[in-house]
Amino acid sequence: PTGYDHAALEFKWQQYWREQRTFATRRREGKEKKYVLDMFPYPSGAGLHVGHPEGYTASDIMARYWRMCDFDVLHPMGWDAFGLPAEQHAINTGTHPEETTKLNIANFKRQLQSLGFSYDWDRELATTDEGYVKWTQWIFVQLFRKGLAFQKEVLVNWCPELGTVLANEEIVDGVSERGGFPVQRMPLRQWILQITAYADKLAAELEEEQVEWPEGTVTMQKSWIGRSEGANIDFILEGGSSEDTVTVFTTRPDTLMGVSYVVIAPEHPLAAKLAAIEGDHQAALVDYIDAASRRSDLERTAAKSKTGVFTGAMVRHPLSDEKVPLWTSDYVLSTYGTGAVMAVPAHDERDFEFALKFKLPIIQVVAPEGGQSSNELEEAFTGPGVCVNSGEGLDGLSTEECKAAVIRQLQEKKRGESKVSYKLRDWVFSRQRYWGEPIPVYFPVTMEDPTGDPRVGDAHTIDYSSPQVVDESELPVRLPELEDFKPGSDPQGCLARVLDWRFFERDGHWFARETNTMPQWAGSCWYYLRFADPHNQEAFISPKAERDWLPVDLYVGGAEHAVLHLLYARFWHKVLYDLGLVTTKEPFKKLVHQGMILGADGEKMSKSRGNVVNPDDIVRSYGADAMRLYEMFMGPLEAVKPWQTEQIAGVVRFQKRVYNLAGRVNKAASMSDETERLMHQTIRKVSNDMDTMSFNTAISQLMVFSTHLASLDDLPEEPVSNLALLLSPMAPHLGEEVWQTLGNDGSLAYVPWPKYDEAKCVESTVTMGVQVNGKVRGEIQVSREADEATVKELALSNVKVAKFTDGKEIKKFIYVPGKIVNLVVGK
Ligand code: ANZ
């Protein structure tokens, strides 16, 4: 043999798999399926980094393992190819985003193929494909028809640098997540997806459907959705009309008798109304409202010291009928609950701070269990306890009982009701960019001169209040050719400049297309469905393909998607479920996040630190199998771990050892007990580790096993062929090569996974103490199956035992297998 040549060997097997279509998806009658999915990458110009292959190797191992366990496996790959970077690149270089995207996809694909992943490339898709865009738009049409997609003038996060609106989720610390550009708030016509209509299901169904998700991710989704149970309570404005009721949302209706003032957000409609009334408070109120409009929610909630002004108005307490002052302050957000709160300084920290600053009363109405109410509170008592100072019927009740009692009283007086509020906001779904799916909507146009033509710029008005969705037969709405991608000052986006595309005439009337495009999230909301039926021209997925493959059994990807992508995709899935188009409530049964791979310096890999490892270099120097094995051997899949190139050497030694075994097999040799036992133990350990995705310990066991086999002078075939099979999900090229060297035909990809025999895993020899007249005198190793005569023979020939038996009469020999060896001797 010429030795282990990773490059030649890996090239050979990749070519074989491609030519033989080894990983074409099969779906057989009566067999169970496994859908193994990776979070598909955005094909950036930088190519793969070592973090990608980590998750992709883990999912590939499971796909290969499950094929060998006789499951039908769907393991696809594709490209999340719309998005800002390609467009930004186009602006900088003049290259069309389509060009850039094509090149990047080709590079990513080459890299993934060089790693030997067992994807069914016939199902490859890009979110930018015409045949894909068509169905993304089709789903939008369904959302529109269900009333879940609509337009609204909203205060949006406008990013002038990027020339687009960003979702709250895309802003970190007041700047855009991508690029770090400043963001400002302004009103703009936007498309909204009403994700809040699904808030309750999104919050509850992860648990109801018993998905196996990391606990931290479930918690993050739930706190993002932010479900709060409480009550809406009405405080009627003194001297106002009936519309001037201030409705507050509270999670603590039990504290109602401790209210000392009510606060509305500066954006609350009543604030503007009160600011229009002349009087002592007007000037301060106007100034305050104006100042607040220039601060972001984040600045407002993080502010060190509370600010606010008295509006000059009073409201009536719903139970006591006392007058309570009405304030406005920006610690109350207009976007949560009702935009108004009842302030209970004794039991809420923000209210406490505010009351101290503005010398407002602090009235304690909750005492700690068994504790006393005090006259001077040093800080807000926010815990549950016992109701005090609230009058008959309430005093003495526990917090939970009191909440229910107050709500009952409010309901009787028609001043309130129980209410659930969510932090989740509706999803601003439009972007004023080029490189995204056009929103398939158009609007009627009225020409100033009826004979005019809007395509040459004749005066016209667009009636945005009458949106019409593009007929399904006319989808997809394609992007127009464009030379200049720069977003301009027109917040309708750069497509608004393409007059030929924007305006069209039908039945003698002019119409204008929507020029907003969808956000990058759109494509990734349903790609996992399309993989099950990627070439279907009649439907986004056929009912049979959906039943055949959904839900995804294993979804592997980064924890950075814990809320955004995973929440949006779940939302679309639930809408499709309600439309009867998919049959499961949740799309992803088991979710696994691979841990981040850090640079050798223990820091996050980044260009600026110069600690980035390029997978291409590793594959070139050591091979794909080494890369795969090393990444899986670094530690538990979900752990954060530093890259250490020098440790690849250990993995390579292991590979060479395995490779050399294949050539040394003697088909006539038989297995020793020890080898057989280790083989069964190894099959058991690796099988269990596969089921729990503990690949690092599986590899350790295979290392131990291979070292043992290498030590044998006469090497039987069975343990080596099992080693090849067990190793193949992790190091598939090497596995195939060993398998072939042993004389097998074709690929091992569908060869049944080895089975172990529990009985053969057990040590067959035991160490036993040998007693002489009841005292332990020595130790012997006996086989579990040994007969009495053999054991007696062994016992008597032990040197230590012999001292006490030599020359004496053996009166009796007692042997209880595994328990007692006793010699009764005479004097
Ligand atoms: C009275 C009260 C008494 C409150 C008390 C708390 C403790 P979560 O849990 O986040 O839902 N709140 C309601 N709407 C608000 C808004 N738009 N901006 C700022 N704060 C708002 O919080 C709900 C609580 O936050 C509500 O319950 C309200 O204060 C405040 F001892 O009402 B509470």
Image (tube, grey):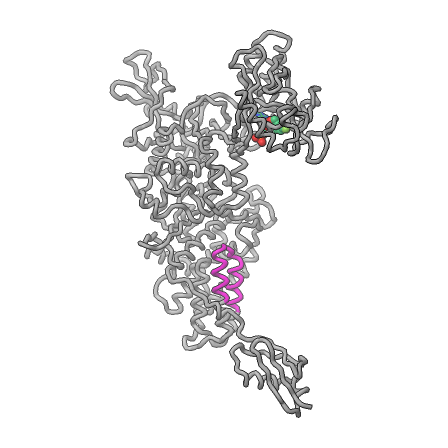
Residue 251 is left or right of residue 578, and the answer is right
The quarter of the displayed image where residue 149 is located = top left
- The answer to whether residue 321 is seen in the rendering is yes
Residue 276 picture quarter: top right
Q: Is residue 100 above or below residue 253?
A: below
Q: Is residue 684 magenta?
A: yes
Magenta-tinted stretch: 681-707
Q: Is residue 105 above or below residue 747?
A: above
The outermost residue toward the left is: 507
Image label count: 0
How far from the left and from the top, in percent, is residue 197?
44, 31
Which of the image's four quarters has the C terminus? bottom right
Q: Which of 648 and 446 lies nearest the eye of the viewer?
A: 446
Magenta segment's dominant SS is: helix
**Left of 376 or right of it: where is 332?**
left
The image shows residue 107, relative to residue 270, as above or below, that is below
Which quadrant is home to the N terminus?
bottom left
Residue 264's image quarter?
Answer: top right
- Residue at 41% across, 62% down: 753
Q: Position of residue 681 (x, y in %)?
A: 50, 66
Spot occupied by residue 123 in the image (x, y as percentages of width and height): 35, 46
Could you say which is closer to the camera, residue 644 or residue 271? 271
Would residue 213 be counted in the magenta stretch?
A: no
Q: Nearer the viewer, residue 300 or 714?
A: 300
Q: Quadrant of ligand 1?
A: top right
Residue at 34% x, 33% y is 138
| Residue 439 in view in this figure | no
- Toward the top, the furthest residue is 278
Say whether residue 5 is left or right of residue 598. left
Residue at screen point 33% across, 35% down: 134
Residue 247 point in image, percent of width and height: 55, 21
